[in-house]
Image: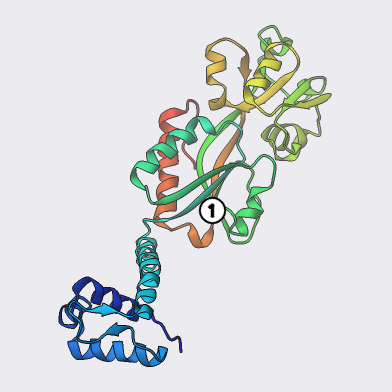
Amino acid sequence: MARIEIKHLRTLVALRDCGSLVDAAQQVHLTQSALSHQLKELEDRLNQPVVIRKSKPLKFTETGSRLLQLADTVLPAVEQTEQDISMLALGKQGRLHIAIECHSCFDWLMPTLDEYREHWPDVEIDLISGFNFDPLPALARAELDLVITSDPQSLSGVRYIPLFQYECLLCVAKDHPLAKKELITPQDLSNETLIIYPVEQARLDIFKYFLLPANVLPKVTRSAELTIMIIQLVASGRGVCALPNWGIVDYLEKGYVLAQSLGESGVWSTLYAAVREEQADAPYIEEFINTARSCSQQTLKGIQPPE
């Protein structure tokens, strides 16, 4: 059995604060007899006194003073932890470490985070890029709490919650020959330089849903990390690109590039919030996803609600 328990530390603090056994007993909700018994129990375990009897106000021995130092360190931490656990039980507190696989997501994610923090200030939020590692397996290992992705993988214990649907559009320079074409086919890109994000081709919408099913590949692929860099290359005639419709609205309005649908029906995809099954129903997780849906609908053009 441990010689020092939390109840002993609380009793000593009450004795220090109140200065007498009678008042201290009331503060810790014990009878005076029960408090005296608890104090005697502690002294017996330590084999030395912790208070100087019959002193007014009550004084502590050197051992008692050292225990009070311990109490001043330990009890606030215990109380904070108890409060944190209560908040967790109510779903008002938790950790939300988010990774993003979408290069254009920051346009709507920042307003989402701003609004979310106003209502859930006790949730610990961290935001990292998922471009240089594979975040979904990290989510399954509980290293992350939520991943924004358009490329769901079949992972045990991971749930994908749709946020919205978007169309992948082909961007071309204003004087590019494809700009005048009414219908873009996969074969139209077989002689083109396709500029992409530095991501595996099989994970990109234009490859997954347009080129690979037709067994077509572009003549050349080159990569750039930033959307604005990709648009600049396209605008200067260095190639074409395929980007989410909501991510290129500003560039289209300013006339930097033109955009066209891919195929007869267009290439539509869904952006998901991936979470672990055991956390999916946590109130602070659910509220983040609801906030993300609301903010994206308010701020993004061209998207549709998830099916």
301 horizontally vs 11: left or right = right
Q: Is residue 82 above or below residue 207?
A: below
**Residue at the image position 35 percent from the left and 60 percent from the top:** 87
How busy is the neighbourhood of tag 1: few (under 14 within 10 Å), some, or many (20 plus)?
many
12 horizontally vs 172: left or right = left
Q: Is residue 51 above or below residue 75?
A: below
Given the image, on which type of amino acid does mark 1 rest? Asp
- Asked which quadrant contains residue 117, the reply is top left
- Asked which quadrant contains residue 7, the reply is bottom left
116 horizontally vs 237: left or right = left
Single out the residue that lies furthest toward the top: 175
Residue 79 lies, in percent from the top left, at 35, 66
Residue 210 lies, in percent from the top left, at 71, 32
**Residue at the image position 67 percent from the left and 35 percent from the top:** 205
| Near-viewer residue (302 or 39) | 39
| Near-viewer residue (92 or 285) | 92
Residue 290 lies, in percent from the top left, at 41, 45
| Near-viewer residue (266 or 83) | 83
For residue 148, say whether it is visible. Answer: no
**Residue at the image position 52 percent from the left and 46 percent from the top:** 126
Q: Is residue 53 above or below residue 9?
A: below
Q: How is the image coloured?
A: rainbow
Residue 189 lies, in percent from the top left, at 77, 22
Give the residue at mark 1.
145
- Asked which quadrant contains residue 182, the reply is top right
